[in-house]
Structures are given as structure tokens and as C-alpha cells.
Image (cartoon, rainbow, N blue to C red):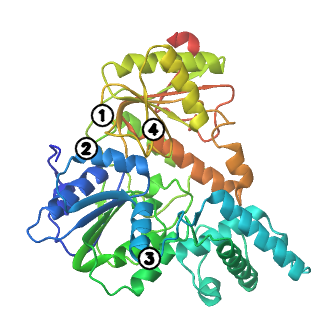
């Protein structure tokens, strides 16, 4: 195990009993992932303590955790939720050949087919004239909460769906579309999709009277899990075992806006980590300015940093006259810092990663792209490339965030397909927050053209430069 000594509240959480439910909420850089790993290691080494599952949302973070943990305990498993779910369903004989899980495109196709068939069946019903995106999002909402009847769906508060108005009487038509979607996909051989996999895991667990495989389950980056994911993991814990939830609502970047309180966790004690060990006060100040934006949706569970341990310079924003000049500067500066520190360029998508990778390679730099298949971890003195989403939970000495323009952030396609612009902007601004708070020292942000409306340009927590100042 890596050499880290927990302090303060971290030490208190480490010492908590190995039973019951525990919730830890923390600000970015407060050591949640580190303590999750330490607690997992501790529980896996208890005499007769049973198996431990440490589970997170994305594959890139799993590889990072495995890299820094280096635990040799055969009782500790680190994996993402969907691998856990597929493994359990397969163990129960419920995972079809060739996977049987619909991807987003296939899911959208069968939902559209369901709605089109219902338009023919009910030609005067106006609900079926709503957008394809609305039906996809509403059916996903049903799946994430695991509503297994019209009564359950009709009586529920539509958490995260307030801006997409739907009267209670019209929910019947949505549920009919949901049932039609299930019928069509199953006829085509699709037993699950990625959003309702957790519902079937939970349902299967209700009928599974075998001894549970894991005595302790720890969830990291729990804010990105759906209620059904959490419920299934809670139910997967052996009698007398423990369930520990680590999360930060400020980094909730998968659009769910769902609370751990809706997920079957039973505790009246919440531990709050408000000391930031990663980010200097300069970066914490900038991150706080992001959360003061008109587009940021406030949440009572959000934890703000009250103390910062690290020291570093002010974040920097540089404006360039062209995208090409911007790329060249970012690459040259990243190569320079990468010689003596871990450095990452955080990109919007794979296309941007490919563009930067090509330029880095041409400069003789062997950069590493971070994704779910990346071995090891991001502590080496070199240059990394990653997306906003894959950067979750990671940290680097220096962070570069290019292309902070209005045609990249918010993403036009995301805004166009969203139920409301308000929801889209609220999700997109958290990507900037996540990227900025990956830095342990330097934060370099760049753009050419028009600056993103999500950037806190009226803040004094960063230094602004024209390209003439830095070239």
C-alpha cells in the first residue's frame, strides 16, 4: 500500500466500525479517493474480515486506484460498477450471450420506435408529440430510480427533471412508452441497457438468498451513481458488514443530479471533508468563483473548502489569435513542465485528444492518453491527455485546459439535445470545475475566439494574458 498517513477527519473515518452505513462528503482535493483506498485496504486486512469491493463509476479511475494502491490482498477487488453488475448477473445465469446490453444509440432507436408505434395507436394524444430527447431522458429517469409500476412513477418527485414539465396525469403515457420500449428491445434480444442494469441487479438480489460475496463495499465518486446503483450495492453487502459512500456533489458531471439520500443509505451521520490537500488556495479561489456562476445549481450537500494546504501560483488564462497558435503554445509548455512534473492536457473529446497527440508526437514527446485501459497511474513526470470525464478523481502537478470557447463549452450538441438550456449549462459548468480542481500546482487555461460564457471572467482569482505576453 502507498505511504500516506491520514490526518484529522480522515483518521476518524479510517477508525469507524466495520459495520453499518457511512457517508463521507468532501470538497475536491480533500482526499476522498485516498481514504476510500486506505479504508478498503484496512478492511481487507482485518482478521476474518471477509472480501472488500471498492467500486467507482469510470474505468480510468479504476486503473488509477489500482496503480496507486498496489495492494496484494486477495480479498480486495477494485472495479467499476458495470463490471460488478455484469459479473453478478452472469453468476446468476442472467447475462445473455453477446452481452445483451443496449448501447445509447440502440436504446434511442427502440425508444423512438416505441413512440412512433404509440402515435399510430393513439393519434390524438399530444404527449407523443414531445421530442425524442424528452422520452429518452424521462425513460432514463424511470430506470435510474427503478420505478417498477405506473403508481410508483406517478407518485414520485421528478428529481432533476423539474425544468421538463410533465403533469402527473400524463405520466401514464410516458410509462406506456417505457413498457413498449422494453417489449421492443426484448423482442430484438436486448435484455438490458446501461441505465437499467442496476435495476435488474437489485431485483435479482432480492431473490438471492445465498451468502453475499462482499462483507464490505466502498463507493468512490458516489455522486455519479444512480439511486438504483447505490441500492443494489447496499443490498450486496453481507449481513453484519459495512457500506461506505464517498462523494462530492460539485463534481456531479453525468447529468443525474440525484442524491445519495434517495438511494437506500441508512445513516444519520454525515462526515464532511472541508480541508483541501491538493489544490493551492489560488486554485480553490478560482474553483469557488466557478460555483458562484448564475449557471451553477446550488446543493445543500456541497462542501466548500475552508482550509488549503498546498501552495501555488494564480491560474492563468491566455487568449490567442488563432487555434493553431493556441495548440502550439499548449504543447510546448506542456512538454516543458512534463520534464519535471506530472502534466495533463484536458480535452473536450477524443478528436481534440488526437489533434494534441499528433502534435506532441511530432515534437518527440511520448504522451499517454488516460482512459479505462490505461495501466498504472498519473503520477509520473510526463505529459498525459484525457477528457473532462476521464479526469474525475485524478490529480496532476500541472493542468492545461485548452479551447475554452463558446463553441466548445457548453457543447452545442449537448445544449441542442437537452430538455432545457438551464440543465445543459448546469451540467457543462461542472466539467470546468472538475478539470480545474485536478491541479496540485499550475493551472493554464487558453482560448481563441469568444470566451465560454461558463468561464468566470469577472473574477480576480486568475491572471489574464494575451499571446504576446507568453510567446
Q: CA distance from mark 4 to mark 3?
A: 44 Å
Mark nearest the camera among 4 and 3 is 3
Pinpoint residue 133: horizontal percent, then vertical percent: 73, 62
* Displayed quadrant of residue 39: bottom left
Residue 426 marker: none
Residue 45 to residue 173: above or below = above
User: Which tag, 1 or 4, sits closer to the chain's start?
Assistant: 1
- Place of residue 58 in the rendered image (x, y in percent of width and height, measured from the top left): 44, 53
> Badges 1 and 4: C-beta atoms under 8 Å apart?
no
**Callout 2 crowding tier (Cα within 10 Å): few <14, some 14–19, many ≥20:** some
SS state under label 2: helix
Q: Quick one: SS at disc 3? A: loop
Picture quadrant where residue 403 is located: top right
**Residue shown at 37% from the left, 85% from the top:** 208
Horizontal side of residue 311 vs 458, given as left or right: left
The answer for how far apart the CA atoms under marks 1 and 2 are is 9 Å
Q: Tell me, for residue 93, which label it has, or none.
A: 3
Residue furthest to the bottom in view is 151
Residue 293 visible, this orientation:
no
Task: State whether residue 318 is above or below residue 260.
Answer: above
Quadrant of the image occupied by residue 21: bottom left
Query: Disc 1 versus disc 4: distance between alpha carbons?
Result: 17 Å
Q: Earlier in the sequence, mark 2 or mark 4?
A: 2
Q: Nearer the viewer, residue 111 or 22?
A: 111
Other residues around mark 4 within 10 Å, as few (<14) / some (14–19) / many (≥20): many
Label ID, residue 379: 1
Q: Which mark is residue 436?
A: 4
Depth check, mark 1 against mark 4: the one in front is 1
| Residue 68 disc label | 2
Amino acid at each position: 500500500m502507498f505511504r500516506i498517513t491520514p490526518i484529522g477527519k480522515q483518521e476518524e473515518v479510517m477508525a469507524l466500525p466495520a459495520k453499518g452505513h457511512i457517508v463521507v462528503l468532501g470538497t475536491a482535493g480533500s482526499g476522498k479517493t485516498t481514504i476510500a483506498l486506505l479504508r478498503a485496504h484496512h478492511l481487507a486486512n482485518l482478521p476474518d474480515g471477509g472480501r472488500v469491493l471498492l467500486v467507482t463509476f469510470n474505468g480510468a479511475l479504476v486503473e488509477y486506484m489500482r496503480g496507486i494502491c498496489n495492494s496484494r490482498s486477495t480479498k480486495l477487488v477494485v472495479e467499476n460498477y458495470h463490471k460488478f453488475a455484469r459479473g453478478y448477473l452472469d453468476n446468476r445465469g442472467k447475462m445473455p450471450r453477446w452481452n445483451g446490453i443496449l448501447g445509447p444509440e440502440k436504446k434511442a432507436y427502440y425508444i423512438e420506435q416505441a413512440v412512433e408505434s404509440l402515435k399510430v395507436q393513439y393519434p390524438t394524444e399530444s404527449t407523443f408529440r414531445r421530442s425524442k430527447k424528452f422520452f429518452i431522458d424521462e425513460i432514463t429517469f424511470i430506470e435510474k430510480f427503478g420505478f417498477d409500476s405506473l403508481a410508483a412513477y406517478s407518485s414520485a418527485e421528478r428529481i432533476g427533471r423539474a425544468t421538463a414539465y410533465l403533469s402527473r396525469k400524463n405520466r401514464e403515457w410516458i410509462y406506456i412508452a417505457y413498457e413498449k420500449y422494453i417489449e421492443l428491445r426484448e423482442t430484438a434480444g436486448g435484455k438490458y441497457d446501461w441505465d437499467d442494469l442496476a435495476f435488474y441487479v437489485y431485483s435479482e438480489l432480492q431473490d438471492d438468498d445465498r451468502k453475499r460475496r462482499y462483507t464490505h463495499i466502498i463507493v468512490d465518486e458516489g455522486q455519479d451513481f444512480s439511486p438504483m446503483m447505490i441500492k443494489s450495492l447496499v443490498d450486496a453487502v453481507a449481513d453484519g458488514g459495512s457500506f461506505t459512500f464517498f462523494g462530492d456533489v460539485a463534481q456531479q458531471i453525468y447529468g443525474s443530479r440525484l442524491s445519495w439520500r434517495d438511494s437506500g443509505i441508512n445513516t444519520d451521520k454525515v462526515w464532511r471533508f472541508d480541508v483541501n490537500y491538493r489544490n493551492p488556495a489560488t486554485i480553490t479561489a478560482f474553483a469557488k468563483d466557478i460555483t458562484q456562476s448564475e449557471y451553477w445549481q446550488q446543493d445543500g450537500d456541497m462542501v466548500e473548502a475552508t482550509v488549503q494546504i498546498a501552495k501555488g501560483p494564480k491560474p492563468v488564462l491566455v487568449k490567442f489569435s488563432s487555434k493553431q497558435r493556441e495548440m502550439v503554445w499548449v504543447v510546448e509548455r506542456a512538454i516543458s513542465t512534463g520534464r519535471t512534473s506530472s502534466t495533463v492536457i484536458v480535452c473536450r473529446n477524443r478528436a481534440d485528444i488526437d489533434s494534441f497527440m499528433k502534435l506532441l508526437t511530432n515534437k518527440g514527446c511520448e504522451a499517454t492518453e488516460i482512459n479505462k485501459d490505461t495501466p498504472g497511474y498519473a503520477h509520473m513526470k510526463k505529459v498525459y491527455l484525457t477528457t473532462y470525464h476521464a479526469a474525475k478523481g485524478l490529480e496532476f502537478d500541472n493542468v492545461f485546459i485548452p479551447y475554452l470557447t463558446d463553441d466548445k463549452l457548453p457543447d452545442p450538441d449537448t445544449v441542442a439535445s437537452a430538455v432545457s438550456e438551464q440543465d445543459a449549462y448546469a451540467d457543462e459548468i461542472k466539467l470546468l470545475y472538475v478539470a480545474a480542481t485536478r491541479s496540485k500546482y499550475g493551472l493554464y487555461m487558453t482560448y481563441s475566439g469568444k470566451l465560454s460564457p461558463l468561464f468566470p471572467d469577472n473574477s480576480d482569482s486568475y491572471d489574464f494574458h494575451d499571446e504576446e505576453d507568453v510567446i
